[in-house]
């Protein structure tokens, strides 16, 4: 009986199906779909951002962001300080016998350096508008920070009584007590507010610029300048009216 040699097993046939090509094709489809979705999403995001920063909606966007860009935890944005020498005088004349006998006049004078401070309240009404890469800002009204700081260490006093008057000390004391209320009135009058208004624009513009930087909107292709106006300068009743306001920009893109 012949010894039969065991047959060698035939090598397994390789599959001819292009698996690698299929995997690459599926990967390409997935990448394309992801890129398309990202493109659509990016386009939607850009549209949403653009809506947030156009006239009619930018005011709401800004007001909602104030707590995040406020320099302190308070409601005050200090704008400017200024020191000046202030002078106060008080005269007191007296006559007797129905004015027939003149007893003289007591004159007192006080000179003292005073520091005035001005601020706005962040919770007050804001209006913002945008046009041609300009951010227009109608800021809240300017308020004096009261009381003004009196530098009493540098105060100069003088008082002289009339020839039959003996009240120069009382007259001087009365004048000194009147200084603080008088300074508060001066700080808030139209003359002083107009004097300090220009100095107040720059801090407001920088405050708004800080917000635009945070929102990635302060750039050459978006907002590149800021105009600031205050309520006592003009009457503006809507964001659209503010958009038409003409004023030299306070801050420009560098």
Image (cartoon, rainbow, N blue to C red):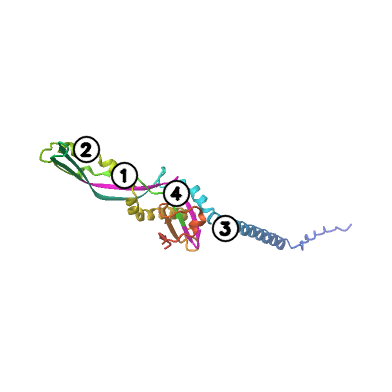
* Tag 4 residue: 69
x and y percent of residue 250 in the render?
40, 59
Earlier sequence position, callout 1 versus callout 3: 3
Instruction: Indicate whether residue 122 is drawn in magenta.
Output: yes
Label 4 secondary element: helix
Quadrant position of residue 37: bottom right
* Tag 2 residue: 174
**Dot 3 crowding, Cα within 10 Å, few <14, some 14–19, many 20+:** few
* Tag 1 residue: 185
**In terms of secondary structure, what is the magenta stretch mainly?**
strand
x and y percent of residue 97 in the render?
15, 36
Q: CA distance from mark 4 to mark 3?
A: 23 Å
C-beta proximity under 8 Å, tags 2 and 1: no
x and y percent of residue 130 in the render?
50, 58
Earlier sequence position, callout 4 versus callout 1: 4
Q: Residue furthest left?
A: 163
* Tag 3 residue: 46
Q: CA distance from mark 2 to mark 1?
A: 17 Å
Span shown in magenta: 111-135
Would you say 225 lies left or right of 189 here? right
Tell me the mark number nearer the camera, choosing from 2 and 4.
2
Label 1 secondary element: helix
Look at the image and tell me in which quarter the N terminus lies: bottom right
Give the residue displayed 48% in from the left and 52% down from the top.
127
**Dot 2 crowding, Cα within 10 Å, few <14, some 14–19, many 20+:** few
Residue 216, visible in the rendered structure: no
Would you say 110 lies left or right of 73 here? left
x and y percent of residue 121 in the render?
41, 45
Look at the image and tell me in which quarter the C terminus lies: bottom left
């Amino acid at each position: 009986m012949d010894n039969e040699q065991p047959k060698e097993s035939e090598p397994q046939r390789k599959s001819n199906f292009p698996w690698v090509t299929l995997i690459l094709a599926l990967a390409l489809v997935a990448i394309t779909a992801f890129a398309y979705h990202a493109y659509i999403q990016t386009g939607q995001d850009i549209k949403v951002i653009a809506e947030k920063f156009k006239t009619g909606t930018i005011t709401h966007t800004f007001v909602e962001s104030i707590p995040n860009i406020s320099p302190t935890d308070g409601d005050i944005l200090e704008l400017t300080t200024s020191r000046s020498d202030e002078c106060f005088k008080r005269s007191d004349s007296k006559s007797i016998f129905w004015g027939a006998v003149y007893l003289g006049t007591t004159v007192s004078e006080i000179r003292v350096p005073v520091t005035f401070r001005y601020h706005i309240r962040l919770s007050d009404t804001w209006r913002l508008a945008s046009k041609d890469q300009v951010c227009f800002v109608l800021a809240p009204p300017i308020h004096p920070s009261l009381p003004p700081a009196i530098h009493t260490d540098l105060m100069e006093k003088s008082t002289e009584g009339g020839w039959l008057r003996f009240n120069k000390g009382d007259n001087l004391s009365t004048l000194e007590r009147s200084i603080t209320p008088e300074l508060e009135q001066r700080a808030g009058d139209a003359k002083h507010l107009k004097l300090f208004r220009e100095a107040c624009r720059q801090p407001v513009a920088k405050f708004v610029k800080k917000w635009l930087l945070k929102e990635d909107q302060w750039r050459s292709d978006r907002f590149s300048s800021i105009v600031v106006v205050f309520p006592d300068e003009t009457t503006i009743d809507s964001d659209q009216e503010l958009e038409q306001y003409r004023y030299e920009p306070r801050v420009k893109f560098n």
